[in-house]
């Protein structure tokens, strides 16, 4: 069946809050996520059983990424030089519109009508499928998870497992309704066989293969692709044209840089020591070779990345290797799932990446959807200080939206913070309020307008009759 246009993203704090509330009320969705995330967390734990060994690996992976970032402009030029030397045509795109146009021009020149796609988050960022479809080109997803959500006209709910929000029964129903009405597919194996039959024909008929890039090696001009299904290899080998899509941060200097990144990527993403396929693409088919595309193109997408690069802290966002571990461990993501964010990148990485790509004024609210527990920071294989970046983005969001302070809701918030500032900056006042709270705090009725919403899901703390200051004094401890 032909692919259908994905829904366009509409970023708004209001719809985010509404979708979050809806997701929290969907017990099936929560069960699906809980089961899937617990499984991924356990697999990751099994592959990294030794905490100090994992720390060592993280150090190595992080060092490689930091070294790369420190020389990013220079390495990108080296990558371009060596790719071109290998016969790979390199295109630079500042925006997603430019990147889409480049892909379309390549397709039009070769009169492409059908393209097969491997998994690529950059293509999601570009909204490439919908764009190509608008221009009469069918782009079909060949990664099984991506294929499932394309059939159901959904966005990915996870960067590694795009259809993780669905359970087996839901997918089986979808296959019977939308893929093959004669299908009696019920098991994962049967459904995979059905999809494979359809996709094999598409691979055979397609004129263009599209793929992402996990890492590109500057010194050798090699594009590396990590995958488990073999569909990536089909996309990059069978059609006469291969177009690889890559964010500019995915470059590494040399082949020696790859092992720590690969080990931490596969272990953090799927709990595998290594994936089934690791493709290294170093150019189009050469004379005498029996397979491979006749043309290979590399599209390097900026889309806000250069701007992130300018700031020392925000630049760390570019360390990301898209493993998804931060999402699997995030108490917010695991409860609301990926769709509530309505962004290409959900979860902790999405909360720091999306406001920087889409603009703080459009998506800064996402930085508030975090408890700042730091679970994401603990598991991130390249040590991105996600919580620090979140705090910076919150700060930027607040300053960008000064007007927000004058809405009714925020006037009250402002009043509370101003009161807090006064009390905490004047020792005398602080002592009086501490004494009052110690005596009267426990009598506060739970149903006051300010407390009732907060206390709906929490127990009010008990105020101590004596302040810490007083207790320390009574114990005779020197506290100056
Ligand atoms: S932020 Fe870290 S944990 Fe999250 S996807 Fe990126 S590399 Fe993985």
Image: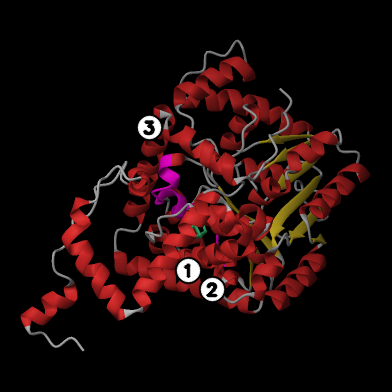
Question: Where is 174 relative to 73, above or below?
Answer: above
Question: Where is 115 relative to 249, above or below?
Answer: above
- Disc number for residue 388: 1
| Residue 470 visible to an observer of this rendering | yes
* Separation of marks 3 and 2 at Cα, in angstroms: 38 Å
Q: Mark 2 sits on what residue?
A: 64
Q: Is residue 139 magenta?
A: no
- Disc number for residue 31: 3
User: Going from the N terminus, do you reach mark 3 or mark 1 first?
Assistant: 3
- Mark 2: secondary structure: helix
- Mark 1: secondary structure: helix
> Disc 2 vs disc 1: which is toward the camera?
1
* Separation of marks 3 and 1 at Cα, in angstroms: 31 Å
Label 1 near label 3: C-beta < 8 Å? no
The number of numbered badges drawn on the structure is 3
> Disc 3 vs disc 2: which is toward the camera?
3
- Mark 3: secondary structure: helix
User: Going from the N terminus, do you reach mark 3 or mark 2 first?
Assistant: 3
Quadrant where the N terminus sits is top right
Range covered by the magenta-colored residues: 319-335
């Amino acid at each position: 069946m032909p692919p259908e246009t994905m829904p366009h993203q509409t970023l708004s704090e209001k719809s985010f809050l509404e979708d979050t509330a809806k997701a929290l009320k969907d017990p099936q969705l929560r069960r699906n996520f809980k089961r899937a995330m617990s499984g991924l967390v356990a697999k990751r734990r099994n592959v990294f059983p030794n905490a100090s060994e994992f720390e060592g690996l993280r150090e190595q992976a992080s060092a490689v990424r930091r070294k790369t970032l420190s020389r990013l402009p220079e390495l990108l030029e080296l990558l371009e030089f060596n790719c071109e030397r290998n016969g790979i045509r390199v295109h630079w795109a500042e925006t997603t519109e430019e990147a889409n146009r480049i892909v379309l021009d390549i397709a039009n020149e070769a009169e492409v009508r059908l393209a097969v796609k491997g998994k690529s988050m950059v293509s999601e960022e570009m909204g490439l499928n919908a764009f190509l479809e608008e221009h009469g080109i069918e782009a079909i997803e060949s990664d099984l998870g991506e294929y499932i959500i394309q059939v159901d006209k959904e966005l990915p709910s996870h960067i590694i497992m795009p259809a993780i929000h669905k359970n087996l029964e839901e997918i089986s129903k979808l296959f019977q309704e939308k893929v093959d009405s004669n299908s009696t597919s019920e098991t994962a194996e049967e459904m995979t066989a059905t999809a494979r039959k359809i996709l094999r024909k598409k691979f055979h008929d397609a004129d263009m293969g599209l793929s992402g890039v996990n890492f590109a090696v500057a010194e050798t001009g090699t594009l590396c692709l990590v995958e488990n299904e073999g569909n990536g290899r089909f996309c990059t080998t069978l059609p006469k044209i291969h177009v690889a899509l890559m964010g500019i941060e995915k470059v590494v200097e040399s082949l020696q840089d790859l092992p720590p990144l690969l080990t931490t990527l596969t272990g953090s993403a799927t709990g595998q020591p290594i994936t089934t396929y690791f493709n290294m693409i170093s150019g189009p088919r050469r004379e005498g070779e029996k397979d491979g595309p006749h043309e290979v193109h590399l599209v390097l997408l900026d889309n806000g990345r250069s701007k992130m690069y300018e700031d020392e802290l925000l630049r760390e966002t570019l360390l990301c290797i898209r493993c998804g571990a931060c999402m699997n461990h995030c108490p917010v993501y695991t409860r609301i799932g990926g769709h509530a964010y309505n962004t290409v990148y959900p979860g902790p990485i999405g909360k720091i990446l999306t406001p920087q790509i889409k603009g703080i004024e459009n998506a800064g609210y996402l930085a508030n959807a975090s408890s700042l527990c730091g679970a994401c920071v603990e598991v991130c294989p390249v040590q991105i200080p996600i919580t620090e970046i979140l705090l910076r983005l919150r700060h930027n969001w607040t300053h960008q939206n000064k007007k927000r302070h004058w809405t009714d809701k925020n006037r009250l918030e402002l009043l509370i913070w101003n009161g807090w500032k006064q009390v905490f900056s004047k020792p005398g006042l602080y002592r009086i309020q501490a004494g009052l709270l110690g005596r009267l705090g426990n009598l506060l009725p739970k149903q006051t307008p300010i407390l009732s919403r907060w206390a709906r899901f929490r127990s009010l703390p008990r105020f101590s009759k004596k302040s810490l200051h007083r207790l320390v004094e009574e114990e005779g401890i020197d506290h100056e």
